[in-house]
Amino acid sequence: GAGVSQSPSNKVTEKGKDVELRCDPISGHTALYWYRQSLGQGLEFLIYFQGNSAPDKSGLPSDRFSAERTGGSVSTLTIQRTQQEDSAVYLCASSSSNREQYFGPGTRLTVT
Amino acid sequence: AQRVTQPEKLLSVFKGAPVELKCNYSYSGSPELFWYVQYSRQRLQLLLRHISRESIKGFTADLNKGETSFHLKKPFAQEEDSAMYYCARHQGGKLIFGQGTELSVKP
C-alpha cells in the first residue's frame, strides 16, 4: 500500500520568505509527527498530532514554526521568515496504535 | 529531559567483523526503545524494538537497565549493513532520537 508521502521533495527559498511543507500520512493512521534532520543536530522532534487531541508542540524551535492537520489526515508545516539555520531535511511520520512510526521521504529545505 | 546518547558518529569495520553500535539512555522508569536505520537514498525505517526481543537482519539489541544501555550488535557485518543507525526512545507519544551513528562496512 501507499506509504507516507511528502511534498515538495526539495525546496530552495530565499531568507525571509515563508514556506509550506506537506505530509500525507498512511490512511487510517491516527498519529502524525514532524521531525527535522540536520547535520550536527541529528533527528529532532518538532510536533506531534494524535487524533483530535491538542498537538504536542514542545519541539518547535521558535514561533516562526507552526503546523496544522486538517481532517485528521494531511498536515502542513509552515515556516515563516525562513532563516539559513532552518535548512534541513524535514521528515514526516505516521503511526497507528502499535507505535511503529512510518517515515516519509522527507523535504530537503535550503534557505539561501 | 530524557536523553538518548550515541557516542560514536562513525563506526568503520571490515566485512565479517563483529559490530556494536552503542546507545545509552537517561534513566526513567521502564523505557521503550527502538533502533531505526536509514540506508542510502532510502527512508528511515524501524529495524527493531526491545519489546520484541527479535533478531532482524542478524542484528540484536538487549536492554540493560543496570547500565541504561541498548546497544545494537551483529556478529558478522555485511557490506549492505552500511547505513545510518538511530537509537530512539518512545516518550509521551513521540520518539526522542540519538545523534545517529554512521556504520561503514568495508570489503
Image (spheres, coloured by chain):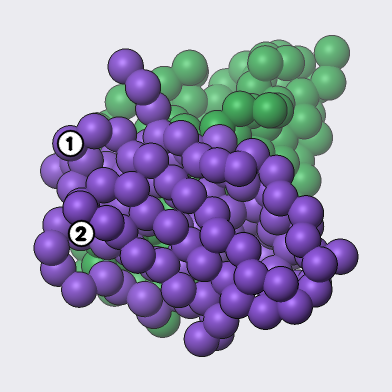
Chain colours: A purple, B green
* Residue type marked 2: Gln
Which one is in front, B106 or B86?
B86
What subunit carries mark 1? A
Which element type, helix, strand or loop, lies under badge 2? strand
The answer to whether the residue labelled 2 contacts the one labelled 1, judged by CB atoms less than 8 Å apart, is: no
Which one is in front, A57 or B53?
A57
Judge left or right: residue B24 versus residue A107: left
Crowdedness near tag 2: few (<14), some (14–19) or many (≥20) residues, C-alpha within 10 Å: some
Residue at 62% across, 17% down: B76
Above-or-below relation of A51 to B101: below
Residue A63 visible in the picture: yes
Residue identified by numbered label 2: A50
Which element type, helix, strand or loop, lies under badge 1? loop
Residue identified by numbered label 1: A28
Residue B19 visible in the picture: no
Which one is in front, A23 or A104?
A23
Alpha carbon separation for disc pair 2 and 1: 12 Å
* Residue type marked 1: Gly
* First of labels 2, 1 by sequence position: 1
Crowdedness near tag 1: few (<14), some (14–19) or many (≥20) residues, C-alpha within 10 Å: few
Q: What x and y, as percent, mark residue A10?
A: 70, 44
What subunit carries mark 2? A
Q: Residue A20, located in which quarter of the rendered image?
A: bottom right
Judge left or right: residue B83 versus residue A21: right
Q: Residue A52, located in which quarter of the rendered image?
A: bottom left
Marks 2 and 1 on same chain = yes
- Which quadrant is home to the N terminus of chain B? bottom left
Q: What x and y, as percent, mark residue A51?
A: 15, 57
